[in-house]
Each structure stands twice: as structure tokens, then as C-alpha cells.
Image (cartoon, rainbow, N blue to C red):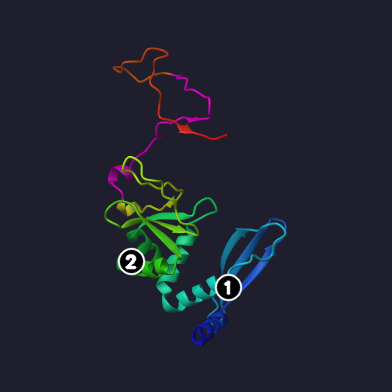
């Protein structure tokens, strides 16, 4: 790939990445600076350093595929950066509308749709559609989601994802909602609910003590 390598070399000449280990706080600071048109300040990204490790082995083929994507589809590369910037080590998926992604990228919805195709075909992401319209999806990175076996005509997948919502898409009632939500209990195995405190104001009809219906609860594993 002479053309790709030549362009990649030119790209590397334009950008220099400095990596410094910051002593005392266990963090690594990454500064990215454009050499040709160096700004007065640099972008700084702080990530946790792994003790005793200075380098992490990565696949060379993935690096070359990424270089090709940058050269051939810069909007797709930008979208990949946007998706990765929203993830942390607890999630591997982002849920967002195409309209919201377009705002984050500073482009149109159609540009986002066009940028998705190379990412899907290049096996960079898996797109899981939520609902019928196709405008809101979960974008999965690094590992595909697992689907349960069909049962009672349901073929489902459950996975953790970070959800990004735009205030412009919300109703007035949602934006103006104040106060606390009602508390749903978090129970460990073997725990039961014990109603305490005052009940609702009249004319509410209180339940007989000991016969109150159980509130839907969240189950915590030990």
C-alpha cells in the first residue's frame, strides 16, 4: 500500500504526540499538537496509568486499517472518535439519535448515516436498532452483543450502554420536572421490604399493616 503509507507518513509529520508520565498521581498525560500550525494551548487528555506497564500491544492490522479509514473516510473516523469519547471501561455501547451525533460532529444527519456505513463494513462497530424508525441506535464497540434464544416469540439482547440525550428533543414537562423521584428499593438476596414512615395525605386509603403491596425492586448480587 505505497499510497497509504506515503499519506500516513505525511500525516505523522503534521502531528506529534507527546506522552509524559506524571509522577505522584498515577496518571499519564497525552498532549496532541499540530506542528505546522501550533496553537497557543494543547489538548490534554488524562487517563489512568496501569502500574508497571509503559506500552500496550495492539494489532498492526488494526492500525493499518485505521490509517486507511482516516484517508478514505474522514467523517467515519471522526464519528468513531465521537463514539469512543463517550465510553468508559464499564460500557461498550453508546445509545444516541443520529440527530444528536450530528450535533456532536457539527454536520447533518445524512452525513452521520453515510459515515456509519464504512464503520459497519469495516467491522469497527455493530449497530443495534432501537425501535422502528432506525434513527435511534446502540453503537457497540469491541464486542458484539449476544442475543437470547427465541422464547415466547421474543428474541432479545440485554447489554450495558451509555445513553446520550439532547435537551432539544425533550418535552417541556421533562425539562421543567423538579423534585425527587420516588425511591425504588435495592435489595440483597434474602432481604424483604419493611414499610416505615408516614403514608400519603388524606383522602388516601392506607393499607392494612403487614398487607402493603411490595414495591418493584432492584436486585443486587452479592
In the rendered image, the quadrant that contains the C terminus is top right
Vertical placement of residue 69 versus 197, above or below? below
Q: Callout 1 environment at 10 Å: few (<14), some (14 to 19), or many (20+)?
A: few
Q: Identify the disc placed on residue 113.
A: 2
Snapshot quadrant of residue 202: top left
Label for residue 30?
Answer: none
Mark 1 to mark 2: distance in Å? 28 Å
Question: In the image as oriented, which residue stretches furthest toward the top?
Answer: 208
Q: In this view of the protein, which residue sits in the foreground, 156 or 74?
A: 156
Residue carrying label 1: 60
Query: Residue drawn 36% across and 15% down?
Result: 207
The verdict on residue 185 being magenta is yes
Asked if labels 2 and 1 touch by Cβ distance under 8 angstroms, the answer is no
Q: Front-most of 124 and 55?
A: 124
The residue depicted at 47 percent of the width and 20 percent of the height is 194
- Label 1 residue SS: helix
Q: What kind of element bears circle 2?
A: helix
139 left or right of 22 in image: left
**Picture coordinates of residue 165, whole percent (x, y):** 37, 52
Q: Is residue 125 above or below residue 175?
A: below
Of callouts 1 and 2, which one flags the residue occurring earlier in the amino acid sequence? 1
Q: Is 16 placed above or below 127 here?
A: below
Does residue 103 show up magenta in the picture?
Answer: no
Percent x, y of residue 168: 31, 54
Measured as percent of width and height from the top left, residue 85 is found at 49, 60
User: Where's residue 109, x and y in %?
Assistant: 31, 65
Residues in magenta, as a range:
170-197
Q: Residue at x 41, y 46 (%)?
A: 148
Q: Residues within 10 Å of mark 2 (few under 14, many from 20)?
A: some
The kind of secondary structure the magenta stretch mainly shows is: loop
Question: Which of the two residues, 23 or 79, is positioned nearer the viewer here?
Answer: 79
Quarter holding residue 175? top left
Amino acid at each position: 500500500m505505497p499510497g497509504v503509507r506515503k499519506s500516513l507518513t505525511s500525516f505523522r509529520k503534521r502531528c506529534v504526540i507527546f506522552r509524559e508520565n506524571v509522577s505522584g498521581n498515577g496518571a499519564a498525560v497525552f498532549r496532541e499538537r499540530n506542528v505546522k500550525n501550533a496553537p497557543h494551548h494543547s489538548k490534554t487528555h488524562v487517563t489512568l496509568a496501569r502500574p508497571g506497564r509503559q506500552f500496550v500491544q495492539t494489532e498492526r492490522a488494526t492500525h493499518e486499517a485505521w490509517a486507511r479509514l482516516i484517508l478514505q473516510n474522514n467523517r467515519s473516523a471522526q464519528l468513531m472518535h465521537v463514539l469512543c469519547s463517550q465510553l468508559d471501561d464499564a460500557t461498550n455501547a453508546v445509545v444516541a439519535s443520529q440527530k444528536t451525533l450530528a450535533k456532536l460532529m457539527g454536520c447533518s444527519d445524512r452525513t452521520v448515516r453515510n459515515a456509519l456505513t464504512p464503520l459497519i463494513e469495516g467491522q469497527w462497530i455493530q449497530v443495534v436498532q432501537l425501535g422502528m424508525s432506525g434513527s435511534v441506535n446502540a453503537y457497540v464497540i469491541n464486542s458484539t452483543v449476544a442475543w437470547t434464544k427465541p422464547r415466547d416469540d421474543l428474541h432479545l439482547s440485554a447489554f450495558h450502554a451509555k445513553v446520550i440525550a439532547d435537551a432539544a428533543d425533550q418535552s417541556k414537562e421533562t425539562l421543567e420536572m423538579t423534585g425527587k423521584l420516588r425511591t425504588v428499593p435495592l435489595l440483597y438476596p434474602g432481604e424483604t421490604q419493611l414499610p416505615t414512615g408516614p403514608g400519603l395525605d388524606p383522602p388516601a386509603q392506607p393499607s392494612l399493616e403487614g398487607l402493603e403491596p411490595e414495591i418493584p425492586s432492584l436486585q443486587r448480587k452479592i
